[in-house]
Image (spheres, coloured by chain):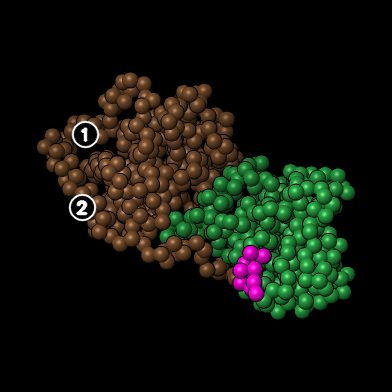
Amino acid sequence: MSTSLERREALKDNEILWYERMLEIREFEKRTNELFASGEIRGTTHLCVGQEALAVGLATVLEPEDVIAATYRSHGIALAFGLTSHSTMAEIMGKATGCAGGVGGSMHMCDKSIGLLPTSAIIGGGMPVAAGAALAFQIQNKPQVAVAFFGDAATNIGAFHESLNLAAIWKLPVVFVIDNNVYGEYSRINLTTPIEDLHLRAASYDMPSIKVDGMDIYAVQEAMTQAVDGARRGEGPTLVEAKTYRFSGHSRADQALYRPAGELEMWQKKDPILLTEQALTKKGLLSEAKILDMKAAMVEFIDQAINQARLDPEPGLEQMFENIYTAAKASNA
Amino acid sequence: MRFRQAIVAAMTDEMKADESVIFFGEDVAAAEGPFKTSEGLLENFGPVRVRDTPISEMAFTGAAVGAAMMGMRPVIEIMFMEFLGVALDQLVTEGAKMHYLSKGEFSVPMVVRASCGSGLGFGSQHSQTLENWVAATPGLKVVQPSDPQSAYSLLRAAIQDNNPVMFLEPRILYAERGEVDTNLKMEIGRARVLQEGSDVTVVSLGNMVSVARKAIKDSGLSAELIDLATLVPWDRAAILESVKKTGRLIVVEESPWSGGWGSEIVSFITTELFSDLKSAPMRITAPDVPVPFNGTLEARYVPTSEDVSAAITEIVTNNKVLQPWWIQKGLNR
């Protein structure tokens, strides 16, 4: 079985794998939803169906040494960046084999080997942390970049403005990525925010910004490459706004009945998996038969991951007391 | 050496010993700190390691978390403890959880220095102690020095610690003078027995240590004076051992009557030593009111050495506890 890092590195220049990883996220989220609905998994979950291109696009542009501070809606980011479906599902099930040993749950994905910082369940929580990681890279003269990944609603919280301001004045190698999926929890963005193009907020911080179609993996890659390269060259932060759409409700309890009629259907025509299929078919890399094969294989693959996680052990009581403090000290102590 | 100079000395020595130590906060670099707690740091260590920040506690507290996760050892200054209110998420919910949520893969070696406490006429929004904001967060350590020696030794220990440490500095002590032995090491988690005695154990913290010391002297009785020094994790063994010997306990706190750290001490000791106690344990605290500005009222707000001395005399000679002064005067209930 491959490690997270191997899965990440395999993505390099492998377009079919990008498509496969998107299928993996789609199938994973579908099954996660079913497992929650049937009561097999407890707690809550936040799905990213429809936002697969953005997750995989980011993973293909960033290096494994770069870091990302993402959110509670991060199964897709975690899988795209390399976490295995088994480890992700085991965490969602609270199993000892999960990426956080079962103490995290659906909202808390983490893997240091692929630069996945513990994802935050607080809106805006990861932005200052990403700025800080970038500060460390800058001081250490390292070429790494930090990414803060968050939703549209997070642009209304103080952390967004404070982090952009700090990153701008210190010219930190950080890219702020807005996953504008139109809804902040149960509220449509136009009800909570006076502007639709959220990347315009970068102007207040004299920061470059890019608006990109988040349903198109190639567009995401182009925009992210521009932003990440700039950060690596020491040109400072960029605000990227990816226009996406949340095909599901906010969390497991939300049926998204507040959506205007026809809106979901309109966005489903731009389904990132469909768009990638079309692009790869045009390039002669995919055929209808191959697509069917890959989808069938993915159903099987996720099924296996789920079954494996089901058989995995629960964490022991002692796990609850682990990793609260570290006994390690500074080298000069 | 003054208390504030001991802070500067500890910072200087740690920054010399470890290149990864960086320092930032509001007006700490060019202006050398509003309380002169960073004199010479910018000059000695330069603008990469010693930085002024915007007035953005959330951003720079979170930036310390992120930088710490990436191998730096940030120390930040929160000018007044109250200002941590707008940044609490980053310390309590992000910083203190990173080790736990990453199965120990990430550590957060950072120190948050904050001035706290009353006595200087700063009014109700700049005079609180607020230890209880941070004392119930596993993953955080909380330290409060009481004199220049403990300021120096404990700050060095805090910077060398690989966990997030909240370092509370009683503002009224900044100008106090005392001997500092820079070779003396103090351990986080260890209380200091400052004065041995046989009839009552007096536990105090920060600014209340000198108040308790004077009270013991004035009482003419044999009291054991303990400086708790670390609130999290607090030294259960030291207090237990002392009260086993004396059979009586008085806790002196600057914080309000309800929800104070002293309740924790009294609760623990009562449970452990119930049948051995010669008297009910007691707390001497501030009343449940905001810190008043008026000089007479503010002086009465904090426990005085007269309060403590009277309580010592009463508990040792009659095995009885005194009611708080505001109850005696019928002022509140």
Instruction: Give the image location of residue A59, x and y in percent.
Output: 35, 45
In the rendered picture, chain B carries what hue?
green
Instruction: Give the image location of residue A240, x and y in percent.
Output: 44, 34
Instruction: Give the image location of residue B91, x and y in percent.
Output: 57, 51
Please tell me if label 1 and label 2 are on a single chain: yes
Mark 2 lies on a secondary structure that is helix
Question: Which one is nearer the viewer's eye here, B206 or B255?
Answer: B255
In the figure, B80 relative to A159: above or below?
below
The reply to whether dot 1 and dot 2 touch (C-beta < 8 Å) is no
Chain letter of disc 2 in the image? A
Mark 2 sits on what residue? A304
* B9 to the left or right of B300: left
**Residue B270 drawn in magenta:** yes
Instruction: Give the image location of residue A315, x and y in percent.
Output: 36, 62
Q: Residues in magenta?
A: B266-275
In the rendered picture, chain A carries what hue?
brown
Q: Quadrant of residue A225?
A: top left
Identified at 46% across, 42% down, the residue is A148
Mark 1 crowd level (few <14, some 14–19, many ≥20, 10 Å Cα): some
Mark 1 sits on what residue? A277
Identified at 25% across, 34% down, the residue is A273
Disc 1 marks a residue whose amino acid type is Glu
Q: Is residue A148 visible?
A: yes
Identified at 52% across, 48% down, the residue is A129
- Alpha-carbon span between mark 1 and mark 2: 25 Å
Disc 2 marks a residue whose amino acid type is Gln
Q: Mainly helix, strand or loop, the magenta region?
A: helix
